Image (cartoon, rainbow, N blue to C red):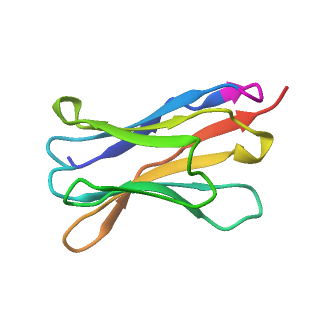
Amino acid sequence: QVRLVESGGGLVQPGGSLRLSCEGSGSLFNDKGVVWSRQAPGKQREFLASFTPWGSTHYGDSVKGRFTISRDNAKNTIFLQIDNLKPEDTAVYYCYVVLDDHVLWGPGTQVTVSS
């Protein structure tokens, strides 16, 4: 069964760090585009970072310098490192993979930044 699951969210104080994981089943990410995005309450979904099918990375303008996307192909996992967390980073974080005929989303992981 093809699946995608995010993990690593939680409650963090401002200034802290988190590493989110997006695990795919089998070779789901091979030669595919994978995207991290987030949605805060009452706001539109926001692009954060991505791997293209050719392995290059892209970042949203609002997160450059604080967010880093990386991968472990052996574990079929895409990571999103978030540093210097701010209250405005509070959101549900999603990853999705662009397949041949549709986009597969994970259920999301909640990140809350609060003191």
Q: Is residue 93 magenta?
A: no
Relative placement, left or right, of 41 versus 80 is: right
| Residue extending farthest right | 115
Q: Is residue 12 magenta?
A: yes
Q: In the image, residue 92 lies at what x, y percent?
A: 61, 47
Q: Residue at x 70, y 55 (%)?
A: 40
Q: Nearer the viewer, residue 48 or 7?
A: 48
Q: In the image, residue 103 lies at what x, y percent?
A: 33, 66
Asked if one can make out residue 111 in the rendered structure from this viewpoint, the answer is: yes
| Residue extending farthest front | 65
- Identify the image quadrant of residue 71: top left
Residues in magenta, as a range: 11-15
| Residue extending farthest bottom | 101
Asked if one can make out residue 35 in the rendered structure from this viewpoint, the answer is: no
Relative placement, left or right, of 57 versus 65 is: left
Relative placement, left or right, of 5 versus 12 is: left
Q: Quadrant of the C terminus?
A: top right
Q: In the image, residue 69 lies at what x, y percent?
A: 41, 43
60 up-or-down from 83: above or below = below
Total number of numbered discs in the rendering: 0
- Identify the image quadrant of residue 114: top right
Q: Residue at x 22, y 41 (%)?
A: 25
104 up-or-down from 71: above or below = below
Q: Main secondary structure of the magenta part?
A: loop
Q: In the image, residue 4 lies at what x, y percent?
A: 34, 46
